[in-house]
Every structure is written in C-alpha cells, then in structure tokens.
Amino acid sequence: MGLYDDYRAKLCSAEEAVRLVKSGDWVDYGSNNGFPPTLDAALAQRRDELQRVKIRGNLIRGPVQVAECDPTLEHFVYNTWHCSGYERKLCAEGRAFFMPMLFRDLDRYYQQFLSVDVAMLSVAPMDEEGWFNLGGALGAERAIVDTAKKIIVEVNAAQPRIRGEKRETSVHISKVSAIVEVGELPLWEMPNPAPSEVDRQIASHVLPHIPNGATVQLGIGGIPNALGELIADSDLRDLGMHTELCCDGYYALWKAGKLTNAAKTIHPGQGVIGLAVGSRALYDWVNENDAVIGKPLSYVNSPWVIAQNDKMISINGCLNVDLYGQVASESAGTRQISGTGGQLDFVTGAAMSRGGCGFLCLPSTFTDKHGVRHSRILPHFGGDIVTTPRTQANYIVTEFGAVNLTGVSTWERAERLISIAHPDFRDELIRSAEEQHIWLPGNRR
C-alpha cells in the first residue's frame, strides 16, 4: 500500500477517531498549539459512555472540553504538566491537577513510568515522505509519540513546519492510527506584552553581562521583550539561540540583525528550540527555516547540552525570592501558577557553561487586588513551591540592580538581596534577617 492509500484508509471524522478511547485509558493531548480542539470536542461528546479517562496536557490555551463538560470528574480527569492561564484556573477550582516535572525529564518519565493508550495531536499536513511535522510543540511531544499505543492526528494547515531530523520533529504515517482533517484553524498567538518601565530597568541591569557571541535563552514576558529592545539598539553582535521556548523576542533580535547563531559552539549557524509560542509572524519565521531546528526537550533542556554553548546566558522571570536565595517561579503560596518547566535546567546549564551565567528577574514589588503593595523579596517562604533552590541561584535582578549569590554566605545573601529590594521594605527585611540570624552585626543599613 502506498503512502496516500494508507492516508485515505486512515482518514475519518473526529467522532470516528475518538472511538479508539476506552474507559480507564490514559490519553495525551499535544502541548500548546499541538492541542487538538476538534478531537477534544468529539471526545467530550462521548462523556456519558466513558468512565475515568485520564488526560494529560501542557500549556494549553483552552477551553479543554473534556474538563468543561465533567465538573464531577467521573468521566474525565484532566492533568497538566505546565499551567497556562486557563489551566491555572482549572487547577485552582479543583477541576484539573498539576503534575510536577522538569521538562528535560519528560522523555524518561514516559519511557520508564507512564503509559499512553491514545495520543491526540495537532500536526502539519503530511509531506511526500509520509511525515506529519509536530510544529511548535515538538519538544514536548516526542516522548508521547514514542510511547503511545495509538496516535490520532488532527491535520491543521496553519501549523508551521520546524526543521530538524524528522524522527525528532515529526510522526510517520505508519505509526498513526487515525487522521482527521480540519482545514486551517487559527493557532494560539501569544506575542510578548509591551515592556513596562520597570521591565526596562530590570533589562538594563542584565544587558552589561551579555557578551558578543553569547548564546541566549529567553523566557517569555515583558522583561525578555524589553531586553530584546535594548539589544536591538546596542552594539552586541552574533548572538545565538538555544531555548526551550522560542518567543517573539528572538524574532525581534533576528530582525535587528543581532541573532546570527554564527558564534555558537554547538549547532553553529542554527538556533535550537523545543517549543514555539508567539505571534503569527513568529510562526511564519520558524516555518521551514533552515536556521531554526527543533529538538526534543530531553536534548534542548539537558544541562550538559546547554553547557556546551560557551557564553550561555539564561534569562528567566520569577515570582518571589527569599533572603536565603530560594526562588519561587511557579506558585503563589500553594496556588499553582505555571510550572517548573525548564528554568532549573537552564540555570544549571548556564552556570556550567564556559563564560555563562543565569539571571532570574522580578519586579521588587507587586500590588494586590486591594491596592496594597508587597515586597517580592521575602524574609522566608511560607508554603511557596521552590523552583530554583538556593544552591543553584546565580544572579537575581530587580529594577534596583543585579546581585550574584554564587558561593556566598547567608548573611551576604541577605545583604545583597536587601540591596535590590524596594527601599520601602528594606528596614523591615533587615529586622527579619536579624531575627533569623542571617544579618552580620555592623552590616550596612
């Protein structure tokens, strides 16, 4: 049977495809734009026929119909590896559950500990060799594809095709159980927000630490966007990309002529990504771009791979830091906000890199819904989930400066962190440090 004969034999409606799911199955959805909305809606329609189907997802915009249709969790139980804003709300309401992980370990989890009865993924149309490209979700989906007993693909012509080895970026029709065509559905667009003045101040403290020829990993949000603007106006040249998530910040650097990948130690001339989430312009840029290659997150996020990039600079956001140097980036107290993702992977890999370092950035304060301002530098955590332990934290950056915590004592950490706290909270933090016996008598105030 030829490729297209096989294609026609497997082509069916979404309603027919989801008949492959049985009660008690573990079903995996694709990450971000790999989420298959048509298949999800069809599976939700089978609610009353099914019992305790467990679904795993990851960074999905929503709505997820299997979660929306079953508030009692008798038929579907939705779980996420990394919360989007939508998934955060589901978890806060007890309608979904978080699965702690490091992105670099996802392959190992699936290979050694997890089962996937049915995988449902949104993919690009099949190429002439029978491969469906996994698009901007490839890094998180490779392990799912390799583990799944059955694979259903939702073919979306809007999906970008990411270059790289096909066995890493795509799934072959020979492994696919059912094919559902949906035409061209809009992708989730999440362009970086416009940076605030505080974002720009934070970025200005990071910029002096970035050398020419550095390979840069950017998180997503206002600070990376502000940094992109500053780099675009700077004299920096020949920057490289090795990142878990490719966002619009990289597209801006490329347009400014700063992102060439020419000085990279590994994969010279090519930026390496695991995921791509941003604007339509970003998707058009990465589509069939030979200068951008996709790899599984087990590779992209491996600290030993990251460290092979000389002058590796990792820049990520966080929520709170305590005076011991512990960093919370994924929860507010016990309320899950996002996930560990790859922050610890890149903080570790950048520290191991020759000439590299990691930056964790945050505004010094936030204002709650009652209009009360709070410090984001805290005396100690009281239930916050630690994303980066104090032993791994390198540079901490606020709008008041950047301090290096590497190799310093508890009193030095307290002194340095208080120096970049908002001035209105410094005296209070000093009193707390004294009570916690991490303030040196005679220290500057």
Image (cartoon, helix red, strand yellow):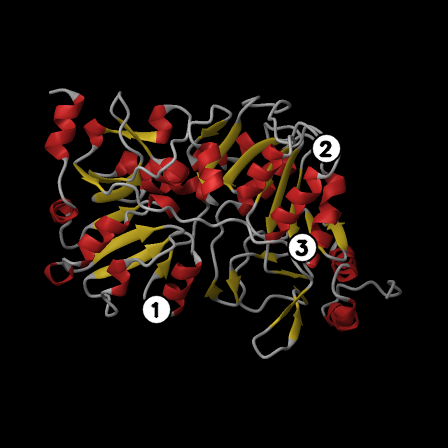
Q: Residue at x 74, y 56 (%)?
A: 413
Amino acid beneath label 1: Gly
Query: Residue 3: x, y in percent?
Result: 18, 22
Name the one closer to the observer, 66 or 389. 66
Question: Helix, strand or loop at disc 1?
Answer: loop
Dot 3 corresponds to which residue?
199
Instruction: Judge from the rendering whether residue 67 lies leftward or rightward of residue 196; answer left or right.
Output: left
Q: Residue at x 87, y 63 (%)?
A: 444
Mark drawn on residue 94 = 1
* 70 shown above or below 233: below
Earlier residue among tags 2 and 1 = 1
Mark 3 and mark 1: span between their CA atoms?
A: 33 Å
Q: Residue at x 42, y 25 (%)?
A: 164
Residue 251 falls in image quadrant: top right
Amino acid beneath label 2: Leu
Name the one closer to the observer, 109 or 58. 58
Dot 2 corresponds to which residue?
236
- Give the quadrant of the N terminus: top left
Amino acid beneath label 3: Asp
Is the residue under label 1 in contact with that under label 3 (CB below 8 Å)? no
Name the one closer to the observer, 284 or 299. 284
Query: Residue 417: x, y in percent?
Result: 74, 58
